[in-house]
Amino acid sequence: MISALSSLVGSVSTQIAGGVSAVAQTAGGFVAPLPAEAADFGSVLAQVAGGAVNTLNAGEATAISGLEGKASVQDVVKSVLDAQQAVQTVVAIRDKVVSAYQEISRMAI
């Protein structure tokens, strides 16, 4: 979870500083390539959130297919583990955002 977050932060920093259209990759691989004009922080977070939702939907669909007998056990386990990693990454990002907000709110004006 921490390595995925570190990878994401490193990718975001590279995109913002360099202004290139690099691909933000996490360990789960649920972040798609970003165009150069979408390199701001809000767009990156929106992309990560969208990718996580897509990963969760795919995991749910595969689990349902597995229950119906249309998907193998290996496919179901892989999809569920990918969804779990996506949730852990999103929770870690949320915790960092809340922590940053609390730190800013404690600053004297």
Image (cartoon, helix red, strand yellow):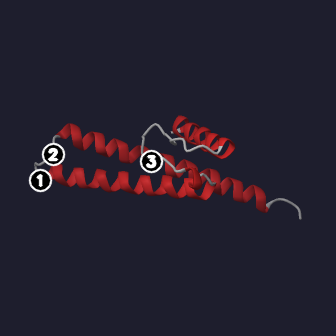
Q: Tell me the quarter of the picture where residue 107 sits.
A: bottom right
Mark 3 vs 1, N-terminal side: 3
**Tag 1, which secondary structure?**
loop
Q: Amino acid at mark 1?
A: Glu
Residue at screen point 76% across, 55% down: 103
How far from the left and from the top, in percent, is residue 89?
50, 46
Query: Label 3, label 1: how many angstroms apart (C-alpha)?
Result: 30 Å
Residue at screen point 50% across, 51% down: 90
State the residue in front, 49 or 38: 38
Viewer can see residue 8: yes
Residue at screen point 66% across, 46% down: 16
| Cβ atoms at labels 3 and 2 below 8 Å apart | no
Where is 66 relative to 101, above or below?
A: above
How far from the left and from the top, in percent, is residue 41?
62, 54
Q: Amino acid at mark 2?
A: Ala
Tell me if 28 is positioned left or right of 37 in this view. left
Q: Which residue is mark 2?
A: 71
Q: Residues within 10 Å of mark 2 (few under 14, many from 20)?
A: some
Please, which residue is most extreme toward the bottom here?
109
| Cβ atoms at labels 2 and 1 below 8 Å apart | yes
Q: Which residue is mark 3?
A: 32
Residue at screen point 49% across, 40% down: 25
Query: Label 2, label 1: how many angstroms apart (C-alpha)?
Result: 8 Å
Q: Which residue is mark 1?
A: 68
How far from the left and from the top, in percent, is residue 84?
39, 46
In this rendering, the label closer to the viewer, 3 or 1: 3
Q: Residues within 10 Å of mark 1 (few under 14, many from 20)?
A: few
State the residue in front, 55 or 13: 13
Viewer can see residue 94: no
Q: Residues within 10 Å of mark 3 (few under 14, many from 20)?
A: some
